[in-house]
Image (tube, rainbow, N blue to C red):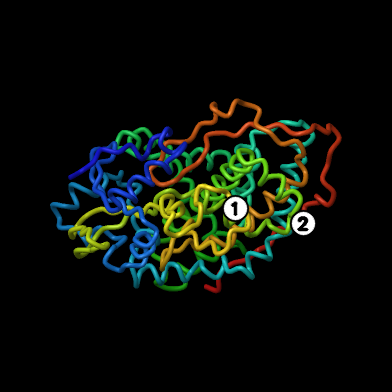
Amino acid sequence: MTLSLDVTSARHKANPYPLYARLRAEAPVVRIRFSDGKPAWLVTRYSDVAAALKDPRLSKDPLRALSEAERKKQVPWMPWFLRPLAHNMLDQDPPVHTRLRGLVHQVFTPRRVEALRGRIEAITAELVARARARGAIDLLEELALPLPMAVICELLGIPEADRRRFRGWSNRLVSIVTGADMLRATPSMWRFMRYVRALIEERRRSGGDDLLAALVRAEEDGSRLTEDELLAMILLLLIAGHETTVNLIASGTLALLDHPESLDRLRREPELIKPAVEELLRFTSPVDFATERYTSAEVAFGEHVIPRGQRVYAVLGSANHDEQAFDSPERLTLDREPNRHLAFGNGIHYCVGAPLARLEAQVAFAAILRDLPGLRLSIPRESVTWKPSQILRGLTRLPVRCAAAPTYSVPGTARPPATNIQPDV
């Protein structure tokens, strides 16, 4: 039986957890039909999601799992100029995935990410000071978004003047759910791809000491990166390097406002910031679905069997609210221990940027709680809206108010030099 479930709409994203609870209880492995008319299987229990994310039979490459006829039916149409995106490491299996991940994972180790703390704190302080001076801010557009965008763009050497355009292009890409969305987004995506190609050519001519230049050198030093792989890697880092963190900071702030006792406790006990970020990752699940996989062989989860050649989504948001894995999962517990959430995935595709996202969120929440007293929504709670999406879960905006201080400035906001870190390629 195939169910018709609305799991991509803004209404669903506002509170998906009652539906997920019913699925875990009644149909933990279920075949559904998306709004684009194409079928897929949802895996919703924590134990099954964790297993699915590590199962080599669930391939990221549909070419391995599907016959030619099946590929025509299930693999989405893509404009010719976007076909290099099929070479991104999220959509690859070993050994290709292993090779591509090896080029960037050194950049995002906890030690190297910690070296960015000073720059992240300075960017955050500047953004928070503007909010405090006015006493009002759209926390998503004016803090949650520019912080991770500035960090990943600085790492890649993206000029500051281009970042607003980049955000529009990124929004278009992550908002694609249907074929019609793809058609509407085509002009923006073409401009995005043209822009990235121009950046690559500029680094080839002039070099540099940023991550983009390092990846270009890796391609030119031998066969480690093809042209398509290089393009796909940069686009993946640009988009994945900020979207999850944007949603975590904005949705996490809303969760704290919805739970004032937790907000007050975190203000009183700032040493809880690290476990609090882990709990907000679990509670809000900024990535609702893991990216799609395809069964290269029959796969069983308990008594439920998914045939070969099927599209499968592991539902991270459901796993993170599974009562079999977490005590009182609908309660926001800042010092939850243990907290083995799956917000960053599991297995070989575990988010390579998780250390950076954690640090950005820790710095942002500490500044919000310390420097924005009297924080509250400036719109009715029922007016808060969510973006439609197949993969992500995030707000459209988050207008808030705080105690205004027109002359306020955060001490120690002098701009330190950007930290250049790059992989050993």
* Helix, strand or loop for disc 1: loop
- Mark 1 vs mark 2, CA separation in Å: 36 Å
Q: 145 left or right of 94? A: right
Q: Is residue 77 above or below residue 303?
A: above
Task: Work out which quarter of the rendered image holds the N terminus and state it.
Answer: top left
Residue 411 in picture, x, y percent from top left: 85, 49
Task: Pick whichever of labels 1 and 2 is earlier in the sequence.
Answer: 1
* Helix, strand or loop for disc 2: loop
Q: Is residue 76 above or below residue 334?
A: above
At a point 34% along the width and 61% down the height, the residue shown is 48
Q: 182 left or right of 237? A: left
Question: Type of residue at label 1?
Answer: Thr
At a point 20% along the width and 43% down the height, the residue shown is 2
Residue for badge 1? 333
Asked whether residue 85 is in view, the answer is no
* Mark 2 crowdedness (10 Å alpha carbons): few <14, some 14-19, many ≥20: few
* Mark 1 crowdedness (10 Å alpha carbons): few <14, some 14-19, many ≥20: some
Give the label, 1 or 2, closer to the camera.
1
Residue 255 in picture, x, y percent from top left: 59, 42
Residue for badge 2? 416
Residue 262 in picture, x, y percent from top left: 66, 46
Question: Type of residue at label 2?
Answer: Pro
Please tell me which residue lies in front, 344 or 185. 344
At a point 68% along the width and 33% down the height, the residue shown is 376
* Residue at the extreme left of the image, as rendered: 69
Residue 90 in picture, x, y percent from top left: 39, 59
Residue 128, numbered label: none
Residues at circles 1 and 2 in contact by the CB criterion of under 8 Å: no
